Amino acid sequence: MSLTARRRTLLAWAMLGLCTLPALAQDRLPANVWTASASVERGRALLSNRQDSGCVLCHVVPGLGGGGDIGPSLLGLAERADAEQIRQRIADPRLLNPGTVMPAYFSTQGLQRVAAAYVGQTVLSGQALEDIVAYLLRDQSPAAHLGSRRP
Ligand code: HEC
């Protein structure tokens, strides 16, 4: 292999690396400035609001009655996904499935920058997104969503 060909091969591998690494990272959005101030109660109110968030139009949500079946049931979500994955799926599900019918509620870029300039352009504010994540991560044992007391 000539020196030029070897260089080209190296370059090709480097480019492949650049393409794959960010793609994997996109599966998860890290915690952010709103995570610490998240409220489970606000999250519940947001999730049950048919006009603003519309989540229950497409999902069965633990602890809330009714719920649509266009999207997967969110029962037991905390057992199959962590906070970063749940956050990413709400913020911009198109990164995982470009053809999804689920709206992108918060852009990746907006979440990683100072919010002020972006808040108006997203369906949910950064705080609202974190409130929803907090609700979905709370104790989801069957007793918790039936509202019964535990022993
Ligand atoms: C128009 C219907 C629709 C609306 C509204 C909607 N979703 Fe979804 N959602 C989906 C579909 C469909 C999927 C399956 C993923 C896909 O399409 O790739 C999904 C996937 C998800 C997932 C991943 C679930 C899993 O088991 O992998 C989460 C979490 C989620 N939605 C949360 C929400 C929340 C929170 C809201 C409201 C802020 C919401 N969704 C609003 C349709 C919707």
Image (tube, grey):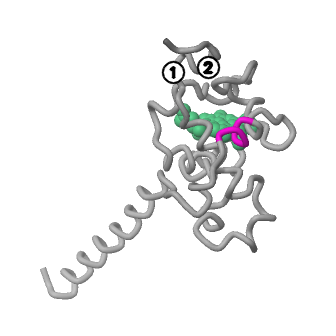
Give the residue number, with chain letter if any, for mark 1: 141
Instruction: Judge whether residue 101 can be spotted in this image.
Output: no
In the rendered image, the residue lying farthest to the right is 51
Question: Is the N terminus in the top left, top right, bottom left or bottom right quadrant?
Answer: bottom left
Q: Which residue lies furthest to the front in this view?
A: 151
The residue where tag 2 is placed is 145
Magenta segment includes 43: yes
Q: How far apart are marks 1 and 2 (CA)?
A: 7 Å
Q: Is residue 101 above or below residue 116?
A: above
* Residue type pointed to by label 2: His
| Residue at x-position 73% and y-position 57% | 125
Residue behind label 2 places its C-beta within 8 angstroms of ligand 1: no
Q: In which quarter of the image is ligand 1?
A: top right
The span picked out in magenta is 40-44
* Residue 60 in magenta stretch: no
Q: Are marks 1 and 2 in contact (CB under 8 Å)?
A: yes
Specify the quadrant of the image occupied by residue 110.
bottom right
Task: Give the vertical position of 127 relative to 135 (above or below).
Answer: below
Along the line of sight, the residue nearer the viewer: 40 or 119: 40
Return the x and y of residue 115 as percentages of the image width and height: 69, 69
Task: List x then y, in percent, for residue 141.
Answer: 51, 21
Q: Is the magenta stretch mostly helix, strand or loop?
A: helix
> Residue, x 74% and y 69% (percent of image)?
118
Which of 27 and 149 lies nearest the eye of the viewer? 149
Could you tell me residue 19's position as x and y percent? 41, 66
Residue type for callout 1: Ser
